[in-house]
Image (cartoon, grey):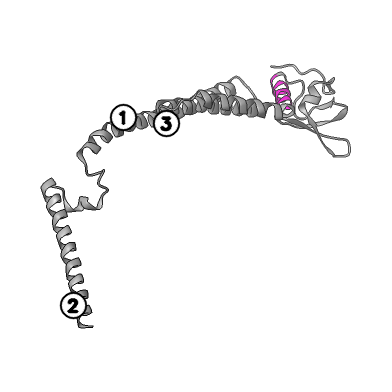
Amino acid sequence: SRDKIINICDLSIWNLYNKIKMERIMFNILQAAKIDTIATALPLEIVKPDFWHRILPLLKDWGLKLVAALLIFFVGKWIAKMLGKVIHSALIKSKTDETLAGFIANITYFTLLIFVVIAAISKLGVQTTSFVAIIGAAGLAIGLALQGALANFAAGVMLILFHPFKVGDNVTGAGQTGKVEEIQMFSTVLIGENNQAIIIPNSKITSDVIVNHAGVRKEI
């Protein structure tokens, strides 16, 4: 039993000696390399001088690209917003309907914004060819899915531009007769004889005969 205790003590002392010896060796290595003790918490690869010689040019290059991309995005977004406002003001001055003017201004803004985003992404070095193709395919799919709504929208634009009738006129269109309550982008609302709200898709109105019972209006 006494011999076992002695052997265990000898083993513990030997392990402690080895631990102190290894710590001393590591301390000498760090001192010889002149590395601050704080750097010992970092991975060995990061504290190597060659690591920073390789990574700094990459950081500088990507940093400049990121700054340029952000500049393109924010300046381009501001320009797109200003052009949208200019177009909206010009359409209002030319007596275009407020709803149509706002819609055209928004379409202009978002279209320009898409090009700005693509330009910013391209500045980062990302290939935008596939990105543009995806946007085109998505636009085609949406157009096919909403072709009925787009037809109504186009008819609404025609009604607003050519004014075959105005709000308050008694008209007959798409087989319905009533007083025009509202001309929307996708539909027209009539009030029937029994005070019923008749909502007609604009494409049905423009594809049929329109009778304006208010007579011919002369623009002043």
Q: Residues within 10 Å of mark 3 (few under 14, many from 20)?
A: some
Comes first in the chain, label 2 or label 1: 2
Q: Residues within 10 Å of mark 2 (few under 14, many from 20)?
A: few
Q: Secondary structure at mark 1?
A: helix
Judged left or right of residue 168, residue 108 is left
Q: Quadrant of the N terminus?
A: bottom left
Which of the numbered marks, if any, corresponds to residue 83?
Answer: none
Query: Which residues are drawn in magenta?
Result: 150-161
The residue that label 3 is drawn on is 74
Q: Position of residue 102 (x, y in %)?
A: 60, 29
Q: Secondary structure at mark 3?
A: helix
Residue 124: image quadrant is top left
Which of the numbered marks, if any, corresponds to residue 61?
Answer: 1
5 in the magenta segment: no
The residue that label 2 is drawn on is 6
Tag 3 and tag 1, C-beta contact below 8 Å: no
Q: Residues within 10 Å of mark 1 (few under 14, many from 20)?
A: few
152 in the magenta segment: yes
Tell us which disc is closer to us: 3 or 1.
1
C-alpha gap between disc 2 and disc 1: 65 Å
Tell us which disc is closer to us: 2 or 1.
2
Q: Is residue 85 above or below residue 43?
A: above
Residue type, label 2:
Ile
